[in-house]
Amino acid sequence: MPEPIIAVSHLSKIYSSGENETVALSDVSFSINKGEYVAIMGPSGSGKSTLMHILGALDTPTKGTYSLGGHNVESMTDDQLAEIRNKQIGFIFQAFNLLPRTSALKNVMLPMRYAGIPEHERVERAEKFLEMVGLGHRMDHTSNQLSGGQQQRVAIARGLAMNPSLLLADEPTGNIASAQAEEVMKIFQDINDQGHTIVMITHEPDIAQHAKRIIMIRDGKIISDKPNKQKRVGNIEIHKET
Amino acid sequence: MKEYIEIITESIGMLKLNKLRTGLAMLGIVIGIGSVITLVSLGQATQKAVQNQIESLGANLLTIYPGSQNTGAVRGAAGGATTLTNDDAAAIKSSPTITTIQNVSPEVQTRLQVSAGKNNSNIQIVGATSVYATVHSVTIDTGSFISDQDNASMSKVVVLGPQVASDLFGTSDPVGQSVRMNGVSFRVIGITVSKGGTGFLNQDNIAYVPLSTAQKQLLGHDYLNSIALEAKSADEMTQAQNEVGYFLLARHKICNPAQADFSILSQQDILNTASATTGTFTALLSGIAAISLLVGGIGIMNIMLVTVTERTREIGLRKALGAKKHTIITQFLTESIILTFTGGLAGIFLGVVISYIYASLTGSLFVVAPESILLAFVVSGGIGILFGWYPAQRAASLQPIEALRYE
């Protein structure tokens, strides 16, 4: 019996502004096991981003329960959530969200700083992850000196820095060119092969095809949840940047 | 400890990232604190200067001025009267009922043209006796002051203030040389030490001659312009004022004190009048300083609010990466403290330097009030820290996703 890392049951999120109520998620239940590679698909406004933010402990559900690695997230305090985000979750944003005018190395070191890891170890680990995403030669470049694809790879290295059990990616290829998107997918594949659980949001079927399981969402409800039978393996051309 | 050093280095790093933003925030604090310190110190320097000059006129001093004389229904001009005489002065000195006075200095004053060779100058001439120097704390630089012998023999001798001496004789030693006043030649017997002062309080542009010589040779009358009295101690000033007052009323045969033909002013009275004048000036400057503090405070508040609110997304990102609320607040508070303290120290430096430059340019006193530094520093620093902390704590309380979405 594989152990679930994410267990979501009857999850709802309702945004209310004045008299208008917008249902972003309604009664969503599913679970994701350790080592899975899941793509969540859906048109814009389907509630997939909201779901992602709740899974990333960045937002709280209106109703329902969310258990992450066996811990109930909705009963946690603000600081406990911060610790969960720090240690359990690596979050990759669509807009990268790097600290501006700060070097790639320092950006990757940031979550480790909040975990209280000593500085020399932070540098060591950040260098290791930046080399892994192919940016070993750009560590001292600040975020505005890097291309979109490079920034996304810094963000991935930052997401991996704390060795999280769960890597969440919100449209990881949404803001980068398609050639670079393939590189990012290759990195995700490698990470998944190392045993990391990956959940990513995308609206591009091409990208979703890299995952092992695809969950389709529409109007805040899951409309399909099945393994990806056409998973493409080994036919990706990698353009390593030099 | 190591953690604090890391927080401080990190904060300095963040402040250096946006130099313009940091510079502007700091400028607000520098100007806020600097202007308050400068304005307050200008006001205090003026007040202190006036006070020092009045105090240098002599200690425990009472001065009797002739009052207006009433002849029937006609009231004469105050100060222009001829009601004080040498005999009054002598009587006060020898009276057994007056116990609180130790020195009596009868004086006359006039302005005259004084010449020596080609040089001449219009100065104040004081007719004095030997006690004048004691009563008014006049000290002699070279030569000697007027003696009792000079007065008794109506000698034509003069003691010059340092400014008169240099105006008339340049760098050469005036003692032993002669000057001319009203066509009469006077021998210079001494030069006084500079007392400073400007305008009507200038005590260096003055010359002293024996009282008897002044009355007979220069003025041609025998009444006095004033009698200066030195009380035995500061505590007995009021008693001395009363004793002398009643003594003179009796001597002048006046029953109603309201009809007195003289007035007695203590140095404190003069000081109070002057303080009231300079106090108005200081109050005005303090008002301007208060407005500067308010405007500076609002400036600091604005720039800190904008600076920190602009970084709401950054706060959201830090939270998303696992920063706890107190970690974020500590970081922003540290940044605000470094910013306000650096700006505050620069502001104090600026204020002190401007006050010093002003003092040396105008020759006035250099006074810096520690309480103005403290007030400006506490108010500006407090505002800087409060408005660095408040928006940061508000942003840190948001859900990370709300802070990240903040535009």
Image (spheres, rainbow, N blue to C red):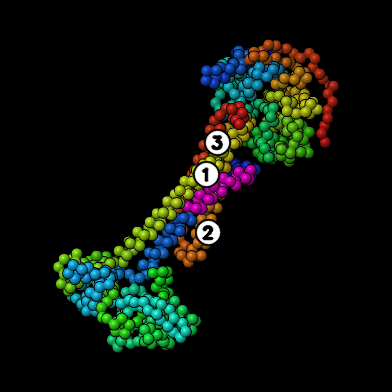
Three-letter amino acid code at the position of disc 2: Val
**Label 2: which secondary element:** helix
Which circle's residue, 2 or 3, is located before the other in the chain?
Answer: 2
Span colored in magenta: B18-36
- Alpha carbon of mark 2 to alpha carbon of mark 1: how far? 23 Å
Q: Is residue A113 visible?
A: yes
Going by the numbered disc 1, the residue's amino acid type is: Gly
* Residue A100 rendering spot, x and y as whole percentages: 67, 37
Local crowd size for mark 3, using a 10 Å CA cut-off: few (<14), some (14–19), many (≥20): many
The answer to whether B253 is drawn above or below residue B396 in the figure is below
Q: Amino acid at mark 3?
A: Ala
- Return the residue at label 1: B299
Indicate yes or no whether the magenta region holds residue B27.
yes
* For discs 3 and 1, the disc positioned in front in the rendered view: 1
Q: Secondary structure at mark 1?
A: helix
Label 3, on which residue? B392
| Label 3 SS | helix
List the residue tagged with mark 2.
B353
Task: Locate the N terminus of chain B by quadrant.
Answer: top right
- Marks 2 and 1 belong to one chain: yes
**CA separation, marks 3 and 1?**
18 Å
- Counting from the top left corner in percent of width and height, residue B106 is at 28, 77
The residue closer to the viewer here, B162 or A204, is B162
